[in-house]
Amino acid sequence: MTMETFELNKEFVDEFIVQIDSKKEDELRPVLDRLYPADIAEIFDNLQLEQAVYVTSLLDSDKKVDVLAELEPEVRVKFFKGFSKEEIAVEFVQHMDSDDAVDLLSILDTDIASEILKLLPDKQDSLYLTRLLRYPEDTAGGLMGGELIKVNINLTVYECTEEIRRQAEEVDRVYTVYVVDDSDILLGWVSLKKIILAKASTKVSEIFDSNIIYSNVNASGEEVASRMKKYDLIAMPIVDSLNRLLGRVTIDDVVDFIKEEADKDYQMLSGISHSVEMKDRVWVLSKARLPWLIIGLFGGVISSIVIGQFEGQLQENVQLALFMPLIMAMAGNIGVQSSSIIVQGLANNTITSEAVWGKLGKELMVALLNGLVCSALLMGYGLISGHSNSIMTTVSIALLSVILLAAVIGTVVPLALDRFKIDPALATGPFITTSNDLLGLFLYFMIGKLLL
Amino acid sequence: MTMETFELNKEFVDEFIVQIDSKKEDELRPVLDRLYPADIAEIFDNLQLEQAVYVTSLLDSDKKVDVLAELEPEVRVKFFKGFSKEEIAVEFVQHMDSDDAVDLLSILDTDIASEILKLLPDKQDSLYLTRLLRYPEDTAGGLMGGELIKVNINLTVYECTEEIRRQAEEVDRVYTVYVVDDSDILLGWVSLKKIILAKASTKVSEIFDSNIIYSNVNASGEEVASRMKKYDLIAMPIVDSLNRLLGRVTIDDVVDFIKEEADKDYQMLSGISHSVEMKDRVWVLSKARLPWLIIGLFGGVISSIVIGQFEGQLQENVQLALFMPLIMAMAGNIGVQSSSIIVQGLANNTITSEAVWGKLGKELMVALLNGLVCSALLMGYGLISGHSNSIMTTVSIALLSVILLAAVIGTVVPLALDRFKIDPALATGPFITTSNDLLGLFLYFMIGKLLL
């Protein structure tokens, strides 16, 4: 009952480090017993390698691997430097859930990973992990683990309970028992609740439910996540093309997957090139942002060249310069609005990259409507502002054209990227938005040249 | 075993509607049996009220409420028009999980909701729901439901199983059994796995685990979500200030919460004012985007006025106009980068709105570093481009200043909003980004005035 008021804070961590350095095992053990793996992992962020290895030596093997599973990948790689390959295999990988073990092995060099696999005491484990490692990270196969309870459909509830007892040692959390036939083909499921409430002599075949939602091992991570979200699943079985049960994906991995994907898209939209957090070092934060800034700078230089081509015209009509920010801001806004709604729709599986024309037509209608409203408002402003009619007409027509152009680019580019299996979120990134600005500006001056 | 290959498609839905219209009950029932509630809810999007009411009449009461819980809020409101208040109370609310019932009642008018509550057959339900309705939607209380299994610590495993049997009728999915004392104070938990594997005469007190993670009923939704995510929980008990067990939050609600929050932040960043999807009507899509466009237009008009103040200077140095887009784009990029990393950090609970100065200092360091790199690159370009030294020096100094200014605004505004309990994501919205543009432009021309 200590969690509610307990929050990891600097004082606690500092005190903890003092105890580590003086190796006060008797004081450390009870504290470590009370801490959850996720909390210990958080403390590891602040420890030197030697200190982390010492703390690990005080943990029992279950907690050891739970802590490891919670570590950030870069902390994990650093941490492993304190152990031999044999120790990694026997003390960690052997005791881990297979999906966590795969996450861990996949961040190591392939040579080292396969050496570790060879050092595992159980050849079955080693074979299963080798197989899991072959699935791409963001597929059902890459997300799944092998820890599940399955029973044959011909058993009784009593035999089933015995079977669960036998298998349950390896499986931390049991929510669902899968029902298979003699060839391991998935037939359905039965809840622990039903097993508890049924008579011992009842057959599994009488109480199991054949309505079961599952995924193929090659399904994408997005598909798995959206299916589990749609049907409110805690765990989903994964099968091969013959419907043989291979593993299961659990909701905690899906939660992490959803959050990571959302964060990635958000950072792309905000011009940060890879996942960073406020606590990272200045140099790391700076490096993550420079790419967009340099592309933006490059775009700015090119736009200065484009505008330079119209310098004579600007001299004549310096008023054209006044409305450049308006045109650019509007082009940027419309482009981002159009592309982000497509990116989000693709991510949430509510749209597909098929039927491009329909979507383009719709986005153009929206853009036309919004463009007309904005241009009309601008003309209205022109009447009271004292700017010449000719300049306001030019700006309004340019605004409408730029809005339509930005909508087309914002719609087509992410759909095209998705069609070619490239992450559509790239369309909300620097390259496209900068091109959008440039094209908008060019269009503005061309229209100015024609009309003024 | 039909799910894998079954995907809702237009042909299926059209065929289904034909069967509804000809009231082919015998053909519809088996199809409805096979469909999951989430699929039926999806079909409802395409039905007329009358058709939806007819389909509902073919469902058993459990499935009926599951379908209802999956409907989008606006579809749900429309759907209720087909039923009397009494029907809503007896056919739906009575059978729903309390968290779903609250979601449903909270979208109705307060008067109607309280009339429906009065019509519930069970006064206990009615009292509990009234209580739940008082908690704000995005708090632990607003997310929790009352369906949980709890047992007294003094029971044996046999008595505990009987108790589960008694309570389990109301609870669809049981993962964890909570252990309480005579005053309902939460003491810990015991897994169904342990209950299955223990002897009938074992005491609950011998096998329960007192390490339990829970939240106070007034905790924010973000806190609940991040705690459940951190500790990989499937359900988390919610207690009052005396630690009495009030309800539980389940992971499926947290998954929805995380996704909705991420989508909201994404749409805010991309300038769409409220949740829309590509499939919404043109007018809905247009309306969701117009606010930002009009603010952007307004900002553009103001910037034309600002630039107008410097018209004489522009006449003299028309080259100043060439670099306006560069300055604006960079100010915008830096501002969004700074604010979005803060917004994301706040959303993920990795930073707090305290210690503002430290964060500001760090962001300024990052901005200074990036600003110096960009200014140096621009000066380098100046050397080969043939622009005059004075103009390039002006633009470079202005660029550095604008970058620093944008970083300050981008950092301080979201932190300040959060401090005043306003959604910090607003800082990535139109008002702040437009102000950023304006300030940047003003600074640019002021520096130009001083140096040229």
Image (cartoon, coloured by chain):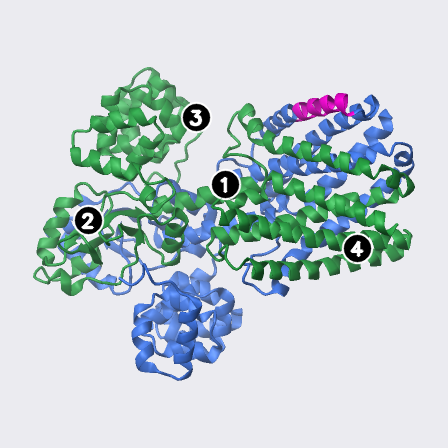
Chain colours: A green, B blue
Could you say where residue A320 lies in the image, as x and y percent from the top left?
85, 44
Q: Which mark is residue A264?
A: 1
Q: Badge 3 is on which residue?
A: A11
Q: Which residues are magenta?
A: B371-385
Which residue shows up at 62% across the image and 54% down it? B273
Left or right of B115, for residue A86: left
- Mark 3 nearby-residue class (10 Å; few <14, some 14–19, many ≥20): few
The number of discs equals 4
* Nearer-N-terminus badge (4/3): 3
Q: Nearer the viewer, mark 4 or mark 2?
A: 4
**What's the distance in space between the residues labelled 1 and 3, CA to CA?**
33 Å
B328 is higher (above) or lower (below) than B55 = above
Left or right of A301, for residue B274: left
Residue at far bottom of view: B22
Q: Nearer the viewer, residue A109 or A79?
A: A109
Is the same chain shared between marks 1 and 2? yes
A94 is higher (above) or lower (below) than A228 = above
- Mark 4 nearby-residue class (10 Å; few <14, some 14–19, many ≥20): many
Q: Badge 4 is on which residue?
A: A397
Q: Badge 2 is on which residue?
A: A149
Give amino acid for label 2: Ile
